[in-house]
Image (cartoon, rainbow, N blue to C red):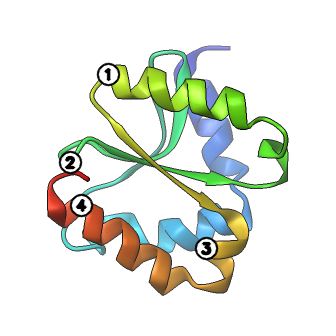
Amino acid sequence: MDRIATARRLRRSQTLAERTLWTLVRNRRLGGFRFLRQHPIDRYFADFVCESARVIVELDGPAHEGREDHDDRRSETLALFGYLVLRFRNEQVLADPGGTADEILSVLRSGRL
């Protein structure tokens, strides 16, 4: 399957946490920053990407349990492409979407960590 088709499939099958965060960041709603979702970078698909700030936001649900080493290697690879990867648990996004958005916006406005 090609990358565009895969990205489209991933967008159609979003988790509740992804839909919640997308509602907060789409259409430049978060501080005027533009986000893309399920954006292909190298061999990965980033959940949410702000290209102008070179920030990726990844949401981790049950599928990520026990895969911390894989996620760390993935973040390191994406860092080689100049991205900062922020990770949030699905539960955090669902319990406190505004707080999650505030954390993301703080990093975006800081120009990096």
Residue type highlighted by circle 3: Val
Left or right: residue 109 compared with residue 101: left
Q: Marks 3/1: CA distance?
A: 26 Å
User: Which one is earlier in the sequence, the residue at label 1 or at label 2?
Assistant: 2
Residue 53's disc number: 2
- Quarter of the image for residue 84 reads top left
Q: Where is residue 60 in the image (x, y as percent from the top left)?
A: 68, 52
**Which residue is tagged 4?**
108
- Find residue 67 and report its horizontal and vertical position in percent: 78, 35
Q: Are marks 1 and 4 in contact (CB under 8 Å)?
A: no
The residue drawn where x is 56% and y is 26% is 74
Of helix, strand and loop, which one carries label 2?
A: loop
Task: Report the front residue among 101 and 107.
Answer: 107
Mark positioned earlier in the residue sequence (4 or 3): 3
Tell which circle, 4 or 2, labels the residue nearer the N-terminal end. Answer: 2
Q: How far apart are marks 2 and 3 (CA)?
A: 21 Å
The amino acid type found where label 1 is placed reads Phe
Q: Pointer 4: residues within 10 angstroms few (<14), some, or many (20+)?
A: some
Residue ID for mark 3? 93
Q: Amino acid under label 4?
A: Leu
The residue depicted at 32 percent of the width and 35 percent of the height is: 83
Counting residues from the N terminus, which is met first, the one under dot 3 or under dot 1? 1
The label number, if any, that marks residue 99 in the structure image: none
Pointers 4 and 2 in contact (CB under 8 A)?
yes
Report helix, strand or loop for mark 3: helix
The dot on residue 81 is 1
Q: What residue type is labelled 2?
A: Ala
Query: Is 12 positioned to the left or the right of 21 in the image?
Result: right
Badge 1: residue crowd in 10 Å (few <14, some 14–19, many ≥20): few
